[in-house]
Image: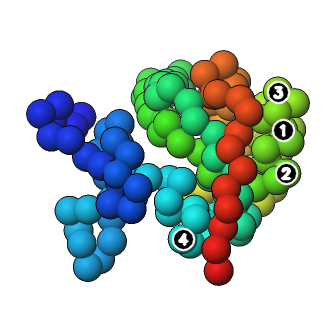
Amino acid sequence: MTNPSISFRCMNCGMPLAEGPLFTTADKPNESMCGNCIAITKKFNCAFCDEPDATWMFHSSEFRVASIDEEDETVTVYDSGDEWLVCDTCKTYVDADQPSDLTDRVAEFRGWPDGMTAENWPDFKEAMRTYFIVLFDVIERPAEKLQVNG
């Protein structure tokens, strides 16, 4: 967690950053830019499916989802961010409140994580769908259309 006495601001527009630097630059490691300014100055991949040219920004409250593996009695915790750069297709699924379709798209485009097997793939997909269900409850709509230069 970020020290509350430290104020982080976007180095481009000056907007306060909720939890510290989202992105840093190599030549100015202590400065950062908000997601909106990053998207304006560079091309980014979709936060969900990883396709290039994400041109929409959703904002949300931060949240945490825990996944429990009953076989080996482990708990995996997934923390969210509060800004989501997304492509046109993923935006359509968020707008239509379709977490299962978004899950299928993400699974198709991102593929299996390291260590994933056919045996544990359905459980992983269900955990991802649960994450999206929670996100859809806290995401702010409508998304902002970003003007991307370059």
Residues tagged 3 and 2 counted as in contact (Cβ below 8 A): no
Q: Residues within 10 Å of mark 4 (few under 14, many from 20)?
A: few
Going from N to C along the chain, the mark reached first, 4 or 3, is 4
Residues tagged 4 and 3 counted as in contact (Cβ below 8 A): no
Residue of label 1: 93
Q: CA distance from mark 4 to mark 2?
A: 22 Å
Element marked by disc 1 = helix
Residues tagged 1 and 2 counted as in contact (Cβ below 8 A): yes
Q: CA distance from mark 3 to mark 2?
A: 13 Å
Residue sitting at x 50%, y 63% = 38
Residue 16: numbered disc: none
Going from N to C along the chain, the mark reached first, 3 or 2, is 2
Can you give x and y, in whole percent of width and height, for residue 88 in the image?
Answer: 82, 53
Can you give x and y, in whole percent of width and height, for residue 49 in the image?
Answer: 72, 55
User: Which mark's residue is nearer the viewer, 4 or 3?
Assistant: 4
Q: Amino acid at mark 1?
A: Tyr
Residue sitting at x 63%, y 28% = 139
Q: CA distance from mark 4 to mark 1?
A: 26 Å
Please state if 128 lies on the left or on the right of 73 as rendered: right
Q: Amino acid at mark 2?
A: Thr
Q: CA distance from mark 4 to mark 3?
A: 30 Å
Element marked by disc 4 = helix
Can you give x and y, in whole percent of width and height, for residue 51 in the image?
Answer: 73, 64
Residue of label 2: 89
Q: CA distance from mark 1 to mark 3?
A: 6 Å
Going from N to C along the chain, the mark reached first, 4 or 2, is 4
Residue of label 3: 97
